[in-house]
Image (tube, rainbow, N blue to C red):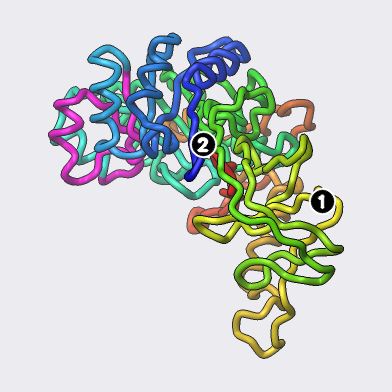
Amino acid sequence: MASGQLTIDLSAIAANWQALDALTACETGAVVKADGYGLGADRVARTLAHAGCRRFFVAMASEGAKVRQAVGPGPEIGVFSGHMRGDTDMIGDLMLTPMLNSLDQLTRHFEALPGHPFGIQLDTGMNRLGMEWDEWVAVAEIALQQRPILLMSHLACADEPDHPMNAYQLDLFRQMTDGLGVPRSLAATGGIQLGADYQFDLTRPGVGLYGGLPFDGAHPVVRLDLPVVQVRELGEGEVVGYGNSWQAARPSPDRHRRRRLRRRPAPRAAGRTAPVARPDALPGGGADLDGPDHSRHHRPARDPGDARGAGRAPARRRSRRRLRHDRLRGADLPRRPLRAALHGVSARPAPAPVRGRAAPAPAPAPDPGSQPVIHGRADGPICARA
């Protein structure tokens, strides 16, 4: 074999979707954005449609064209980026369903495609896409009159089941959507595994379909085979790769070797896992054939005066981190249920306990001129970590 060979197991994608669907009592969709996580959105969507999936999600309207051609006119295709300028004809012609993220998108959609299906995305702390609390309160009554087919949000830390951000976002999502009579969706792969409280009417698994964490039970989808190019002996203390990013803790061989990519790059040699020693080298990469216990990543010390130095984090980043943890440790959410806001009710009950946690004590009403900010983490898993 003179070059690498990538094998994609489409049946494993179908099996992973069925396994995640079995964990819920609601409808299960599928995220096929970024060209089906790089595996071909058309073939992935067609496989999942045959397995029973009837709702798909893409990042942009342009991605919906390939999916629509693959699955035909029946299944619903949601667009996370909403109704962008210039997308009107594509959304209308292909019967795509934009998840509207702002007042501007709401206005554009209602004026350009009156009566066309749409959903609404709400921001519950991830600070990525969607309407925040104040914007949603301002437009909810008008938006609900147009009958959205879905209200959705996205969890920032669902791959960490005990992270307090999960309970925070669940509580806020409920306050923003309870009693509105519209189907809801909050959970992707990680959220599905948090339990029924997070699943609502529709789940949207993405990375778990392709064999990625946090779905531990996933079937491997991708296999990458690479040829051996060179074998060499390294002495203790010798370094490998750009920036000396890996250092041998004892004499060890360095070899380009077949590797199997599932959740972490894990080349194998003689039946043992060989940790990646040169993940930064393209097209080549190295593996430590002595195993995981005799290697370490190495970063040379920097001059304390270096502007890029590894000293203290900038003050702004440190203060944000403290703010995030202070708010998540037990501070109540200074919000009130949206249905109360729409009807002019000023009282706000304490949040219900979430997954065994005691409800925090009610907080005083917020200053109308202030908007609390929660800095959630947005470092989710990817399909194949390199």
What number is the disc on residue 257?
A: none
Residue at (39% x, 45% y) in the render: 135
Give the mark, 2 or 1, whose residue is nearer the N terminus. 2
Residue 293 x/y as whole percent: 86, 51
Residue at (57% x, 21% y) in the render: 199
30 versus 101 height, above or below: above
Name the side, left or right, on which 72 lies relative to 150.
left
Total residue callouts: 2
What number is the disc on residue 290?
A: 1
Q: Amino acid at mark 1?
A: Asp
Report the front residue among 37 and 155. Answer: 37
Residue 64 seen by the camera = yes
Tag 2 residue: 154
Report the front residue among 91 and 266. Answer: 266
Residue 187 seen by the camera = no
Name the side, left or right, on which 289 lies relative to 212.
right
Neighbour tally class for label 1: few under 14, some 14-19, many 20 plus, Cα within 10 Å: some
Name the side, left or right, on which 362 lies relative to 173.
right
Residue 146 x/y as whole percent: 26, 24
Residue at the bottom extreme, as displayed = 305
Identify the element where label 2 is drawn. loop
Residue at (36% x, 33% y) in the render: 58
Identify the element where label 1 is drawn. loop
309 versus 245 height, above or below: below
- Magenta stretch? 76-104
Neighbour tally class for label 2: few under 14, some 14-19, many 20 plus, Cα within 10 Å: many
295 versus 102 height, above or below: below
Residue at (25% x, 38% y) in the render: 62
